[in-house]
Amino acid sequence: MSGKRHRDTTASGIVTIGQRHATLPNTAKRRWKRLMSIAMAASVIALAQVAWGLDPPHDFENQVEFPGLCDECHVTHNASYPTGLGFLCEKCHFEGGPATAVQTHSSLTNDNGYGDWDIKCWGCHDPHNQDQDEAFSTSYGKLIKDNLNTRIYEINPGDPGPYYEPISTLRIVSSSVLKFTSNTEFVDGDGIAEDDMCQVCHQSTTNYNGGGALNSHSDYGTDSQPGGDCSTCHYHSTGFGASGGGGCTGCHASATGTGSVRRQVSGTGGDFERTSHHVTDGTTTEIVTDADCETCHDQGSMGTSSDPDVILFDPDGGSSFTYDGNGSSIESFCLNCHDSDSSTAFDSDSNGGNGNQPFSDGRDPPDVATTWNSSSHGTTSVSVLADEKCLACHGGADSTRSGLTADQVAHGSDFAKLLSALVNGQTVTNGEEELCFACHDGLTAASDVEGEHAGTELYTDSSGALISTRHDVKDGDQTYSGAVIECKDCHDTHAADSSNKVIADPDPNDGVTPTAGNSWAGSTFLSEWCMDCHDNTYPNAVTAPTNALVDVATAFSDNRGDQHGVQSAGKNVNLRAGIGWARHDILECTSCHNPGHGDDGSGTAYPNLFNLRSQVYSKDGSTPIVADQCWDPSDCTIIRLLDASSGNTDATTNGKAWCSTCHPNPMGGNKTSGCLDGNCHHHDTNSF
């Protein structure tokens, strides 16, 4: 009665006991009956003995769901491996089943660096008896063996699971004193491996063996140490893979350890589902793989370096970098990937001809390094930039690491472009202008851009259009006018310096060729920088105002002869002597208008309507011009334009004094209500 199938000529091709009996001679039949009677009697006795030996929860006779006994697991015929086990453990131990869902400890749930391996359930468990209770007088049990003699099998991972046919035996693990009386007995720390549930096998592994790697989990809290509960991080439901699964993304799918020392990186709510993140398809969907993690992170020292040290590979193949908690320690690490050749050491498609894309998303990192070292931010002496470099502005929040700066994680951010929510010690709620204001406040950096945008500068012009009198950078201005423009739309923070504040063509698709240097400084009137918006066509990143702006590119550059920069010799234009300006000169935008913010940076922030300068300079830009009427008697070079309506007769604020900087006593003193906007003169009129 081997239980094997026997071929016959029946329709099914399987010979049953009855069929075999029918083919025997009469003498043989009588002998067969005697043998069967003896065998059946022995089987009944054996079943009774085994039945009484079954401990809960496998005492099926006492379970309503399982009215049978041995035949719930064992069948005499048609049995799968090992012989006599028909349905194996997965009959009950599956997700949603009547027993705890589990997976076997194998290379499919853990590290496959040792090959394709698997440990069968009965390698650790005795399905019949609570050996631990009997051997050590405990009440813990869990059907764990106290005398271990198990095989670690080689398997074919391509076979259907969750249980696998063995190809060969890799090695045998034996112990006669295995002791597991509680969840703190996985590793008891007494230096003897044979009585420890995990150490009995882990003597031959790289991590957490009996040698120097025993404390390799020292950063992960007390449960990771000898005498701790390994199941806090390693679940039977996932084959004892770390925190729900093996590999980087499985282990870091949740925070664990005292004080949440091992932080969450992947999984629901992790870094790679944030608004912007490394390894992305342009959405918040996580697509990062373990191989992507290993592109940056050196696994050789994982778990052994002191907190907060992180060992990072050089993207160009040189020596590894150690992040020590300060961004300056890894500036070169960032730039070696964000340069003209990207990551030469880690090219995901192994094709340097199409650029070097380090991650599986196939994206080329933007080139920052080419201009960074000569830019204002790259060479600045501002302490926060000197200390943190790239991480001064970039990085996502990491609230799990107490005692460290809250934004130090380069995986992902809740703001665009991996921008930080903590800059220069200030919490940023707006990832656009507030991030720049955190330093450009007149204290940290020399320029007080924040002060130039203080309050709101709202105005209704003569046509009834709602406009902001400066560029619509702040939320309040944007709400009023409907226009949206951000610092980054004009400034390249990785390339801008004191002489060249704009580096990129804001609207590369409008057909206008940028001037030399791509900067507003020294440009002609039809500067690419200004006319990218003031021709009433806008770059993709800029939102147009609700009321259309005047098309300055058309209105001011025609040949009517009545625009500033008159081309007609017959026009009677009075100009102040000694200022360098002459008739027929065509003015640049920046001769009258501050190029970006609310003032000209003269040291006193006096924002004017229409972003007009509060100091107008001579043609060579060296000397501020004195106005006919002094708004500030202590300094007659300061001019204001606060109300350009026809009802304002205050020359110091209605624009008359402003125009008098170049045109002395304009209109012979006959004009009292100002010159600009609703009075007579403005862009797109025949008298400007």
Image: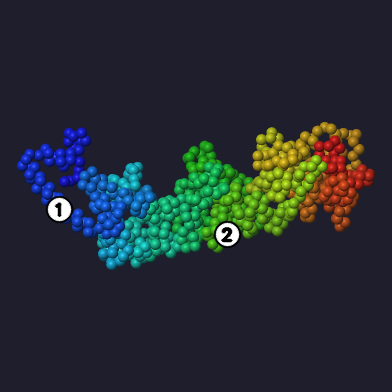
- Nearer the N terminus, badge 1 or badge 2? 1
- Judge whether residue 585 can be spotted in this image: no
How far across and how far down the image is residue 165, in percent?
29, 46
Give residue 79's quadrant in the image: top left
Q: Pick whichever, 408 or 228, lies toward us.
A: 228
Which of the pair 244/558 is nearer the observer? 244
Mark identifier at residue 405: 2
Tags 1 and 2 in contact by the CB under 8 Å rule?
Answer: no
| Residue 502: x %, y % from top left | 69, 45
- Label drawn at residue 42: 1
Residue 422, percent across and down?
A: 61, 56
User: Considering the image in quadrants, where does the C terminus appear?
Assistant: top right
Q: Secondary structure at mark 1?
A: helix
Amino acid carrying mark 1 in the image: Ala
Q: Determine crowd level at label 1: few under 14, some 14-19, many 20+ residues with C-alpha closer than 10 A.
A: few
Q: Is residue 455 left or right of residue 150?
A: right
Q: Residue at x 78, y 51 (%)?
A: 607
